[in-house]
Amino acid sequence: MATEQLQGAPLRIVQVGAGGMGRAWLRTIAAEPGAELVGLVDLNVDAARSALADHGLEGVAVGTSVAEVAAATDADAVVNVTVPVAHLPVNVEALAAGLPVLCEKPAAPTVADAIRQAAAAEAHGRLLMISQSRRYYAALDALRDEVAGLGAIGSVVTEFYKAPHFGGFREEMDHVLLVDMAIHAFDAARFVTGADPVSVYCEEHNPSWSWFQADANAHAVFTFDDGSRFVFTGSWCAPGLETSWNGSWRISAERGSAAWDGGSRVTVDDGEVREREIDPAAKEEIAASLAEFLACVRDGREPSGSARSNLRSLAMVEAAVQSAETGARVRIDDVLESGLALALATEQDPSVRAVLEGPTLRG
């Protein structure tokens, strides 16, 4: 549908994925006046129908192919809520069908696959946005605004301490904190500072009382391109005095400091200690992510979480894992270059390979 035709009507959305997170997105799309759910895609069509029935959603097409359901419903866009390993094929299918895509984080299991789908978005001339939902908090926006007035940044410290008993795959996976959670803090640090990571040194360990099979504690020090340091320290087996799921933040800068409790409290000391007022009505998390995506589809601008921009957030995770495994400092550009080389070795689509061989994904 042409851009001018999108201005007055809700965007027609096909969602892919009807699992636990998929159900959260169903509620979010239903509550968004700028969107209309017209299709739900899942390999298990019975699960898709059950999810729709549980949410009282009628008249929604169900199928197993995003391209087929999108064509049958005259869809305008796709929301991808599949498991990470399915992000690349689903996103490429939707982009090739001419549809912009909002994809759940992480962009892909590897930097190489994230680069391939970012290149596919450019090759097909369609938006691919990664939903880093924890970037969308009114308090985080306020923190960013305050930090901008404090001059040069010396350090950003995020402390993350929780003690969830997930059961299942998380308690068995390697690098569980880095891979499954830390990207939120890594991405938010880029958002708050406006700077990008250059290198990282990271250590992991597992306390004797941990109920996780692999290391559940991680401590990473990133050097950013403005000379500042971002320090992430956290644990997923830390009972007592738990932080918010967003962690606890402190920024030390040239003209003062700012702190965020991960909830609704932002404190600033720039010679005078004060609390920043937060808009209680602001959209947050996936609702705000969806709203930004819809606005960008309508007006053609690039979102803060475009697939190309998100590459460095994912590379921070991959670099931290490499550092923890090797005991060496790892350069972010080395991770991106290795990912690009693997993407070129894997990609078969000539139009996507042309993008990979060009300059736009090498910046």
Image (cartoon, helix red, strand yellow):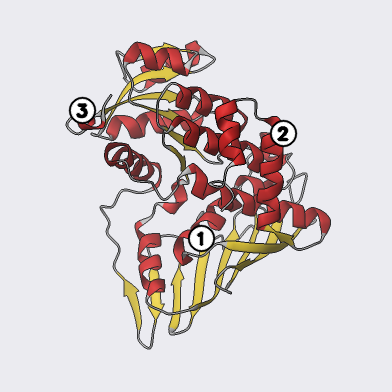
Question: Between residues 278 and 363, which one lies in front from this camera angle?
Answer: 363
Residue type for callout 1: Arg
**Residue 56 at x, y = what percent?**
31, 20
Q: Relative to residue 156, is residue 11 depicted above or below?
A: above
Quadrant containing the N terminus is top left
Q: Distance between the residues labelled 3 and 1?
A: 35 Å
User: How far separated are the C-alphas under marks 1 and 2?
Assistant: 30 Å
The label on residue 113 is none
55 is higher (above) or lower (below) than 212: above
| Mark 2: few/some/many CA within 10 Å (<14, 14-19, 20+) | few
Q: What element carries label 3?
A: helix
Q: Mark number for residue 190? A: 1
Q: Can the viewer see residue 322? A: yes
Alpha carbon distance from label 3 to label 2 = 40 Å
| Circle 2 residue | 345
What residue would you read off at disc 3? 5
**In x, y percent, where is residue 141?**
37, 61
Contact between labelled residues 2 and 3, with CB atoms less than 8 Å apart:
no
State which tag comes first along the sequence, 1 or 2.
1
Look at label 3 and name its amino acid.
Gln
Secondary element at image label 2: helix
Q: Residue furthest right?
A: 326
* First of labels 3, 2 by sequence position: 3
Amino acid at dot 2: Ala
